[in-house]
Image (spheres, rainbow, N blue to C red):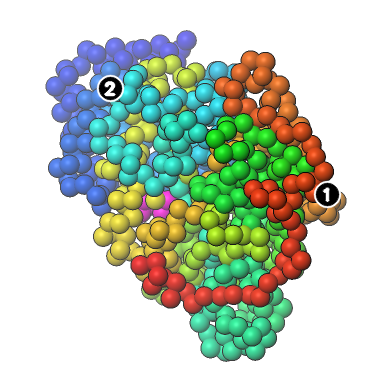
Amino acid sequence: MKRRSVVMLGLAAAATASPRHVFAVGLDDARKWIDREFQPSTLTKDQQLKEMEWFVNAAKPFRGLEVNVLSETIPTHEYESKTLTKAFEEITGIKVNHQVLGEGEVVQAVQTQMQTNRNLYDAYINDSDLIGTHARLQSAVNLTDWMKGDGKDVTLPTLDVEDFIGKSFTTGPDGKLWQLPDQQFANLYWFRYDWFKRPELRAKFKEIYNYELGVPVNWSAYEDIAEFFSVHIKTIDGTRIYGHMDYGKRAPDLGWRMTDAWLSMAGASSKGLPNGRPIDEWGIRMEDGSCNPSGASVSRGGETNGPASVYAIRKWDEWLRKYAPPGAADYDFYQSLPALSQGNVAQQIFWYTAFTAEMVKPKSQGNNTVDADGKPLWRMAPSPKGPYWEEGMKLGYQDCGSWTLFKSTPMPRRKAAWLYAQFTVSKTVSLKKSHVGLTIIRDSDIRHKSFTERAPKLGGLVEFYRSPDRVRWTPTGVNVPDYPKLAQLWWQNIGDVNSGAFTPQQAMDRLAKEMDDVMARMEEADKKAKVYGGCGPRLNAEKDPKEWLGKPNGPKAKLDNEKPPGQTVDYDELVKRWT
């Protein structure tokens, strides 16, 4: 009651103020922010002011309101929380409490709000990995209909949805937009460009492996390079170095390490973009033209415990044990990636571009992977392909943190939060935000001349996001019927591989069964009460796995040779093809 009284007093005070005065103050503040903070922009300053004028007008009914939003902790969201909330309040009169927490806590809050219909937060920046969940449960707001209906009066005319790189990731099987991208980043290959160019290292690598040291095209070459630096080279410039980095701490982010397309990088899925069909990168089967998942186990036509998936988990565990620095197996997501700045790792197969900002910090801040001029000694490149991978498949993961509204949020609070969400991705703001966090969402931003000028200091980020290749890195898709329920199964099973309690095959067999068990309960609930809108799982009857393995559109049969000859490509030639 107390909070509501304060909010109502704020609204009453705003109502008694002169509308002309409120408008003038908002525009004056907008001018200051445009001049001092929101440069560069793809808009002219006059166009920026026009866009901010719309926000001032649209926010009038909500001046004095205080709303709460939640996102995970990455530099982009910290910038929003500390800087953009202040700008938004000064310009619109709406106060936003933008809380940042760990990814697991965000997923838990989203799940709780969906299950209880209690309004915990007024909006979330929530991974598009939940697109299959939101489109089925329909507790989230369908943004396509929202922008034309109840939210029309608070939808930015210059939002330009077609400009968003990740729009396909946030579109449900119904063709509707359920989430609005706020930031995105890919998991790419990272390597020490300076070491790979050293003549003595190149000569020694060719002598041992009989091909050139370069960007690995396949997992065979990645493994050879990992062995080369960890076993044969060992030290560079007096420092003990390693050929691989990863993480293995038994925690929820270990599960995301695998659901983030690791299986499909090895080749454990069907062809298709943004996700394989009928089998996606989680190994879940869903037939073309259907919205009903039919199983994860090979015995049901899925691939979670198939040969390609087991191979992927085996290699993750093997490389972590043999080629990574001591202690890496106990790192979590947040510890492993910045650890590269110590300068003792040659390459990383699974590196998120969200950490580019961390990796381009100056040498004076303890970053040993830039030169005296601040230029990176490293580069990013496309992820190498596993032996089961086929042309036409996705090649890796792309995180797409996206604004998500829920029907459980009261309408005034939902509209005010939607205004803030659009403010954070507006063309007035988005280019500057992209330079701060390096998590680009707009095609117009990445093609701006400011990124052309900055490209030499970003290690290939600009070239990648301007290339046509970027579409082959995609988030979890619509085959996953309930992300929070299923994602929590992964880290415990994968943790048992890292601890040595289970073999990769045993762990994936158990995981596939647990996924099928959970989906069976979803199926029952959907049949009884259409909990998933009729698009819940409809599991296939179990068969002998031999009836599925190696069949057209079925899980892949085990290869006789899972280590074909290593292949590499020269990085500079690769960039020429991109540009």
Instruction: Tell me if mark 2 has few (under 14), some (14-19) or many (20+) residues whose alpha carbon lies within 10 angstroms of its own.
Output: few
Q: What amino acid type should be assigned to the residue bearing mark 2?
A: Asp
Q: Position of residue 67 (x, y in %)?
A: 41, 25
Q: Position of residue 451 (x, y in %)?
A: 32, 60
Disc on res. 170 = none
Q: Which residues are magenta?
A: 434-439
Whether residue 323 is visible, yes or no, is yes
Query: Disc 2 to disc 1, how far (Cα)?
Result: 55 Å
Mark 2 or mark 1, which is nearer to you? Answer: 1
Placement of 534 over or under 211, stated as above or below: above
Q: Taking 284 as reference, is 126 left or right?
A: left
Q: Residue furthest right?
A: 501
Please tell me which residue lies in front, 250 or 548: 548
Tell me the quarter of the picture where residue 300 sits.
top right
Tell me the quarter of the picture where residue 537 sits.
top right
Magenta: predominant secondary structure element?
A: helix
Figure quadrant of the C terminus: bottom left
In the rendered structure, does residue 328 fall within the stretch colored magenta? no
Q: Residue at x 57, y 82 (%)?
A: 212
Mark 1 lies on a secondary structure that is: helix
Label whose residue precedes the other's in the sequence (2 or 1): 2
Q: Which residue is mark 1?
A: 506
Q: Position of residue 333 (x, y in %)?
A: 61, 52
Cβ atoms at labels 2 and 1 below 8 Å apart: no
Q: Taking 395 as reference, is 178 left or right?
A: left
Q: Residue at x 29, y 51 (%)?
A: 444
In the rendered structure, does residue 438 fall within the stretch colored magenta? yes
Mark 2 lies on a secondary structure that is: helix
Placement of 374 over or under 476, stated as above or below: below
Please tell me which residue lies in front, 235 or 411: 411
Disc on res. 153 = 2
